[in-house]
Image: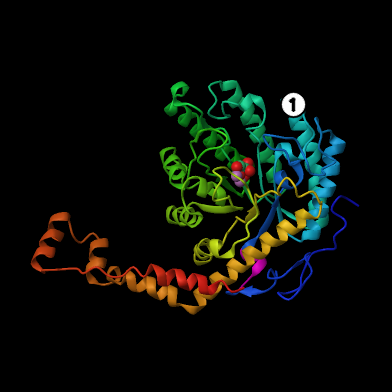
């Protein structure tokens, strides 16, 4: 029995069901373009917002019933939380979860105690995973909540903080490996600055690069086969975060020689905070060959911070889903609900309703993407738009057959006079809208 035991396991009941505690669209075994829905979506629940957040905000304390939280989390509280978390995960029926070290363990005063507490709970997590067959999508270290990290972890002016963070990451990377985690995430929560006036930008980047290289080396040393992921975010909590978006992360990885080792975990609300579309970030990551995983949520168009709401608009997500499906899917990544309830969502079962709605939203977007692909019109319109690049001139240019001046000669002599053509934006948009009928 736990806080979440009131609800029977969530099943697919179809679009006509009136049962709030059932999936209307997500049917895990339904084949979509030859692959099970479950395998496209690799659904994941995050520990922090779901079980570790009491409903506090900057103006007030916790509102949600989370009896295992308190001023100081003991081993017994951590175990109570674990029971409740796995009860919820099993009833919801998702295949994966994610966590930070500090989400799951008893609070520690020293690094040694930190390592021991994490090991202790990891043994129990492994038992729960074996019993429920729920897998770990990724683990990560919380390098941003404790006051010691106020000026960053790897980018801290104090090397002792760097060393502390290294120990923390070493412990949780090893725990993630032991638990069979499929990825390891670094979100640079405070790796950035509040003012450039007191900041050595180059020095901080170099130290961040060194830190990441150490993580990658250790991954290989222990034989961890999962993917190392960086999660871009432009700001919040710091004014400027070095991993501000996919392009900034790629430049960073290139500069420090890590493009083959590290990929990105893209969060919807982080993309929008960066002033970019979610699908842009995915397309950029695919183009650079560093696409990894998704933290799915949504922001509020009128609020400029990370509101981490559950997704509820399939049409908004369809262009991104199309990018992912066309790229062949998620590989080691997943759709991790990095989303939280609202402060007034006091009923323990609201956590089910939130996830069910989010999961059905993703399933709708997946079916819409399938419809767009099956209809073939969208792809054909795009192909026609770029047809010239598959014809003689385009091919020759890309095959290095011209220099700037020989191409200039060719352009002059052949008397070319290209005419602008319609970009057909409205037609593309109407195809997406038309496919969102699930
Ligand atoms: C915060 C981030 C965080 C990471 C994990 O905005 O989304 O939750 O996903 O550290
Ligand atoms: Ni996130
Ligand atoms: Ni976030």
Pointer 1 residue: 112
Residue in the image at 46% along x and 31% along y: 205
Residue 161 located left or right of residue 82: left
- Is 36 magenta? The answer is yes
- The one nearer the camera, 102 or 260, is 102
Image x and y of residue 390, in percent: 30, 71
Image x and y of residue 179, in percent: 73, 47
Q: Is residue 60 above or below residue 125?
A: above
Image x and y of residue 141, in percent: 65, 37
Residue 248 in view of the camera:
yes
Image x and y of residue 271, in percent: 51, 49
Residue 326 located left or right of residue 122: left
Going by the picture, which residue comes out furthest to the left?
A: 413
Q: Is residue 201 above or below residue 328?
A: above
Residue 262 in view of the camera:
no
Q: Quadrant of the C terminus?
A: bottom right
Q: Is residue 77 above or below residue 433?
A: above
Q: Is residue 315 above or below residue 311?
A: below
Going by the picture, which residue comes out furthest to the right?
A: 1
> Which of the colour schemes (rainbow, by chain, secondary structure, one colour) is used?
rainbow
Q: Quadrant of residue 330?
A: bottom right
- The one nearer the camera, 417 or 315, is 315
Classify mark 1: helix, strand or loop.
helix
Residue 201 located left or right of residue 101: left
Q: Which residues are magenta?
A: 35-40
Say how many tags the image has. 1
- Is 407 magenta? The answer is no
Going by the picture, which residue comes out furthest to the bottom?
A: 375
Residue 151 located left or right of residue 60: left
Q: Quadrant of ligand 3?
A: top right
Residue in the image at 56% along x and 71% along y: 436
């Amino acid at each position: 029995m736990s806080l979440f035991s009131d609800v029977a396991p969530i099943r697919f009941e179809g679009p006509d069901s009136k049962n709030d505690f059932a999936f209307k669209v997500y049917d895990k075994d339904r084949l979509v373009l030859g692959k099970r829905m479950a395998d496209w979506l690799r659904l994941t629940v995050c520990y922090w917002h779901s079980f570790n957040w009491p409903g506090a905000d900057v103006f007030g304390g916790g509102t949600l019933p989370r009896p295992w939280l308190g001023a100081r989390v003991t081993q017994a509280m951590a175990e109570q939380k674990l029971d409740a978390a796995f009860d919820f995960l099993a009833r919801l029926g998702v295949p994966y979860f994610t966590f930070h070290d500090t989400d799951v363990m008893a609070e520690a005063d020293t690094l040694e105690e930190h390592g021991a507490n994490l090991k202790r709970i990891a043994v129990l997590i492994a038992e729960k995973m074996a019993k429920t067959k729920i897998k770990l999508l990724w683990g990560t270290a919380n390098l941003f909540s404790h006051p010691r990290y106020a000026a960053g972890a790897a980018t801290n002016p104090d090397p002792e903080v760097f060393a502390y963070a290294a120990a923390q990451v070493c412990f949780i990377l090893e725990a993630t490996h032991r638990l069979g985690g499929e990825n390891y995430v670094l979100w640079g929560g405070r790796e950035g600055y509040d003012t450039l006036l007191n900041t050595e930008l180059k020095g901080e980047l170099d130290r961040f690069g060194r830190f990441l290289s150490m993580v990658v080396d250790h991954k290989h040393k222990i034989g961890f086969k999962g993917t190392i992921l960086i999660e871009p975010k432009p700001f919040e909590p710091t004014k400027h975060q070095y991993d501000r978006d996919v392009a900034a992360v790629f430049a960073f990885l290139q500069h420090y020689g890590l493009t083959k080792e590290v990929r990105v975990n893209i969060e919807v609300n982080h993309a929008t905070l960066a002033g970019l579309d979610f699908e842009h970030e995915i397309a950029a990551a695919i183009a650079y060959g560093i696409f990894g995983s998704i933290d799915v949520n949504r922001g509020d168009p009128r609020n400029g911070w990370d509101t981490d709401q559950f997704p509820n608009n399939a049409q908004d997500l369809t262009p991104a889903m199309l990018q992912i499906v066309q790229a062949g899917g998620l590989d080691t990544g997943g759709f991790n609900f990095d989303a939280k309830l609202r402060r007034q969502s006091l009923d323990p079962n609201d956590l089910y309703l939130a996830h069910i709605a989010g999961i059905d939203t993703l399933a709708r977007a997946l079916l819409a993407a399938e419809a767009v692909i099956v209809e073939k019109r969208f792809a054909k319109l795009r192909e026609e738009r770029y047809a010239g690049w598959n014809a003689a001139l385009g091919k020759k240019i890309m095959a290095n057959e011209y220099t700037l001046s020989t191409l200039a000669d060719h352009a002059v002599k052949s008397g070319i006079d290209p005419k602008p053509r319609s970009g057909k934006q409205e037609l593309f948009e109407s195809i997406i809208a038309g496919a969102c009928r699930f």
